[in-house]
Amino acid sequence: MTKQFAVIGNPIEQSRSPELHHAFAAKAGVDLNYKKILAPLDGFESTVKDFFAQNGAGMNVTVPFKEQAFALCDQLTERAKIAKAVNTLWMQDGKLHGDNTDGQGLVTAIQALNWSLENSRILILGAGGATRGVIYPLVQAGTKQIVIANRTLTRAEQLVEDLKDAVAQTELKAIRLDELTGEFDFVINATSASLSGEALQLPENLIFHHAYEMAYGKPSSFLEQAQERQVPSTDGFGMLVGQAIEAFSIWNGVKPELKDFL
Ligand code: ATR
């Protein structure tokens, strides 16, 4: 029987998840159908329940429902608990399970570029949900230090306070975005600046050796500055594919290779 999957969000038209999952399925020989579901902003829970009541096998969750998905689950993976957000749902033994594969997607994408995370010092720009979701997988990949720089310092400080016990092996620090300085192996742009078309000015005295923009398919002043400095850089398409690979593997027990789908 064809397994039924979906991605749920609002808006949803822009999602590339159906094409990715259909491509993985074709390569792995899995019989599935994966559609987009536009849920009303006040109708996330009932839409999810209807989908699983009709024998849906699994769902991806995107903006703005990842925190609601987290709250709805009966069982959560460790990384979803730390992220406080869920992007992957499935039903098992009558219980709704939730995981967050975004951070591992980023790690997979970085490793596929042969950029080593082992003992690295990482600067993350932004302190919202996107940042929270990637900290634990970055730590597990062997990162030595993570500095979170945010326009609103208190938000970065709160994030450090929330996460420091869960990632005790890595040094976590918060700084103000406009006081950025120092040298880092990686800078990751997890602000929503590129999504809203706003510029992000990196100071001259900030030194970095790799740049990762989490957004994709949008002009990015962050990537332009990395390119001007001739620093190796990329947009977030690899992360998108990486998180989809993790979800596909949880649901279908087969792990597609990132390099086949970039
Ligand atoms: P997400 O879930 O995508 O992380 P979010 O929780 O709204 O979205 O967080 C957006 C992040 O981008 C925040 O860290 C925000 O900074 P503030 O906390 O100071 O608002 C950051 N951000 C958005 N636009 C920005 C800009 N133009 N310059 C710098 N930071 C920006």
Image (cartoon, rainbow, N blue to C red):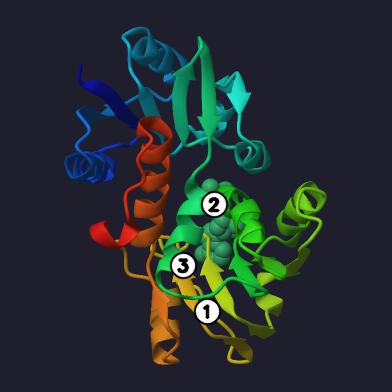
Q: Is residue 25 above or below residue 164?
A: above
Residue 212 horizontal/vertical position (percent): 46, 70
Image quadrant in which you'd find residue 237: bottom left
Name which residue lies at 67% across and 42% down. Answer: 82
Q: Quadrant of the C terminus?
A: bottom left
Asked if residue 192 can be seen in this view, the reply is: no
Name which residue lies at 74% across and 69% down. Answer: 175
Q: Nearer the viewer, residue 151 or 252?
A: 252
Residue 241 horizontal/vertical position (percent): 34, 53
107 lies left or right of 237: right
Amino acid, disc 3: Ile
Frontmost of labels 3 and 1 is 3
Discs 3, 1 touching: Cβ within 8 Å: no
- Disc 1 crowd rating (10 Å Cα; few below 14, some 14-19, many 20+) is few
Mark identifier at residue 201: 1
Residue indicated by mark 3? 110
Residue 16 horizontal/vertical position (percent): 26, 46
Instruction: Say which element carries label 1.
Output: loop
Cα separation between marks 3 and 1: 23 Å
Ligand 1 sits in quadrant: bottom right
Amino acid, disc 1: Gln
